[in-house]
Image (cartoon, rainbow, N blue to C red):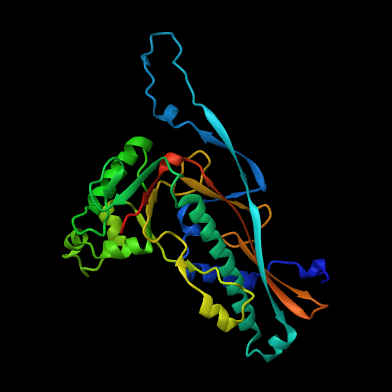
Amino acid sequence: MPNPTQSDLHINAPLTQVSVAYIQESSDYIAHRIFPKLPVNHQTDVFWKYSKSDWRRRERNLKRAPATESKGGGWKMDTDTYRCDVYAFHKDIDDQTRANADSNFSIDSDATRFVTNQLMLGRDIDWCDTFFSTGIWDTEKTGVASSPSGDQFIQWSDDASDPIGDITSWALDFRQLTGKKPRILVLGAQVLVTLMNHPDILDRIKYTQKGVVTEDLLAELFGIPQVVTAYATWTDVDEELDARAQDADASYEFIADPKAAAFYYTPPSPSLQEPSAGYTFTWKGYQGKGNAEGITVDRFRLRRTKVDRVEAEVTYDMKVVSPDCGVFIADAVA
């Protein structure tokens, strides 16, 4: 297959806008919503990590005698690295299909949505593997059916459980440990459904205007500014099967564990001098003209096969930066 000429290779602004619109509408995906995106000029580099204890340590003997210098000090720093890999996916539109389509723009738009969806699906899977699982954060809580001990709690599917007390208590411990207030709570899909029907929560909101549990109401009850639910699903069906066989063979699962939850501290805007549970590094030096999510869409001609290729690309590296700035809640519901 011949390479396209250099003049064919460009970021297609209208199709990239379609990709932007699709991202904004596809709120089920969460990877681009949780941790700050930090644009970087180089694919790989070193970044600094500040010592937490130095910034919260009380210096002693600061009283200054006449004609003496002030007491001085500083902080220690460590380093970590990132590497933004490039992910890409394309859909070819052959001339015969295009000639038979009712609208050229619609077929390009559909292809754009398809390739964008693939990148977002993969990115959410990577996000869950990196940030939404056991063995990642310094603090983990585990729900049990009865007799909790240590870092265990009664699962919230039990009407006698206390989800508001649990989360607010853990958030207070979190502030003592980190000096920061959790800013975002991520719920598995089943956790949200359970909380929406929990008697304690229903009792708390029964005198509100609508008396309906929403993510915003949960945020107010828990004292965490933002609540996000992970709804996106996926299937691992064999692409080589025909359409009917694919649909018959497919089984669908939530990407994020539907019975888990987690909360994190993330800064309002990205800064390498600000602690954050994690960052998503995006390589703006490669995709300077991409959309806000780092996704670009190109359309170029493959003359030999008489097809137009719609191709989407995204670059990122998801990094846990401060393991103490996240709390994972396993088996929150039965």
In the image, 282: left or right of 139? right
Q: Nearer the viewer, residue 57 or 269?
A: 57
Percent across and percent down for residue 32 are 50, 58
Percent across and percent down for residue 316 are 60, 54
In the image, 241: left or right of 278? right
Q: Looking at the rendering, which quadrant does residue 305 occupy?
A: bottom right
Is residue 167 in view from this perspective? yes
In the image, 11: left or right of 282? right
287 over 77 or under it: above or below: below
In the picture, which quadrant includes the C terminus?
bottom left
Task: Report the number of numbered marks.
Answer: 0
In the image, 6: left or right of 84? right
Residue drawn 53% across the image and 71% down it: 22
212 over 83 or under it: above or below: below
Residue drawn 49% across the image and 46% down it: 278
Residue drawn 65% across the image and 42% down it: 45
Q: Looking at the rendering, which quadrant does residue 197 occupy?
A: bottom left
Residue drawn 51% across the image and 60% down it: 124
Percent across and percent down for residue 187 are 37, 58
Is residue 27 in view from this perspective? no
Percent across and percent down for residue 126 are 54, 56
In the picture, which quadrant includes the N terminus?
bottom right
177 over 64 or under it: above or below: below
